[in-house]
Image: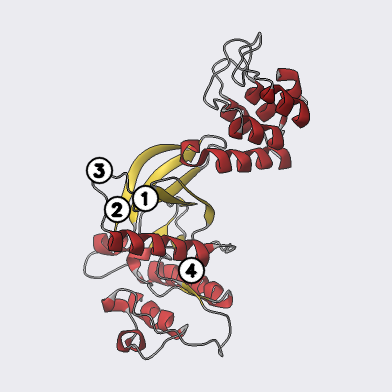
Amino acid sequence: FHYSAGYGELAACEALLRAGADCNARDRAGMTPLHWACLKGHADVVGVLLRLGGADAFATAEIGIFAGKTAIDLVASQEGERAAAVREVLLQQMGASLFQLRKVVGRGGYGVVVKATRRDSGQVLALKAVRKQTSGDAAPPSPAASSREVSAALKERTALAGLQHPFVVSLHCAFQTKQHLYLALDFCAGGDLAMYVRHAGKGGLPEPTAQFVSAEVLLALEYLHGEGVIHRDVKAENVLVDEQGHVRLADMNVAKRHGAGDDAPRTFTLVGTPFSTAPEVLRGGGHSFACDWWSFGVLL
C-alpha cells in the first residue's frame, strides 16, 4: 500500500482499499500511505485515500527524518504544480479542518472573522465564517438572519471571484461545512482605516498620508469598475491596511457584478451605510458605478 501510494499507482491503491487494506497502516518509519502520497505529490491518490479510505491527515511519522510530521506538514515543504494540486485536493476533502485557527479578529452582522493558518502551506489568512440555518442547532439563528448572512457571503464570493489587484482583498478559496460557509481572504495585519482616523484626532490624517491612501482606494475602485463590480459600501471601516502599509478595499458583501461600461443597466437595491451612501441609492431611483464615487468623496 505504501509503495503504491508513493509511486502514484492509483488503481493499485483503489484495489487495496476494496480488499480491506488499512489506510492508516504504518511502515518501518511510522509513515502512512497518505504521508507518501503527499510527499511525492500524487494528488489523485491523496484524494482517494481521504475520500474512500478515511486516511488520517494528522497522524505523525514516528521515526526517521520525518518524525513528528503529519502528511499535511510534508505538503507544506513542497513547491511546484504537484504540491499545488495536492493542496487543492486537501482543501476540497478537509475544508475547515485544514486551517489552524488563531484568534477572532472581527465580528459583525456578516458572521465572524478569524485569523487562521493553512496547515499545508503555512499561509496566514482571514477566515470569514458565516453561520447557516441547520435543524440540529441547539440555538439556531433566525431563518431571516441566517438567510441574509448566507446571501451576503455568496454575493461577496461572486464579487471577488477572479479579481486580483494589489489594493483589493483577494479571495483565496471558499468552502462549506454542515453549519458554516467559509471565505478565506487576505489577512491584513494593520487593521482598518477608521482606526487610524480615530487615533489621528480632530485634524484627521496628515495630508500626504491622506493623499497616499486616497490614491490607492481610487485605483482599487477604477479596477473594480473596469471588472464590472460596484462596491456599494465604500467607507473607512472597509479599507484595510496590510503589513506593508498599503490599503486593501474589502467587505464586498453588498457588492454587485453589474457589467462594465457606461451603458450598464441601473440597479435598484437599497444597500450600504446611510452616512456614506449616494442620494440616488437612498431614493431608490436606480444607481450604477457613480454611487461609489460619492462614497469615495465622503471618505476623503
User: Which quadrant of the view contains residue 136?
Assistant: top left
Task: Give percent across and percent down for residue 85.
Answer: 68, 42
Under tag 4, what secondary structure? helix
Q: Amino acid at mark 4?
A: Glu
Residue drawn 59% across and 32% down?
50
Q: Mark number for residue 138?
A: 3
Under tag 1, what secondary structure? strand
Find the distance from the CA under tag 1 to the CA under tag 4: 24 Å
In the foreground, 143 or 227: 143
Under tag 2, what secondary structure? strand
Comes first in the chain, label 4 or label 2 = 2
Say left or right for 100 vs 264: left
Q: Amino acid at mark 2?
A: Arg
Residue beneath label 2, please?
107
Point out the image quarter for the N terminus.
top right
Q: Mark number for residue 113?
A: 1
Report crowding for label 4: few under 14, some 14 to 19, many 20 or more residues within 10 A (C-alpha): some
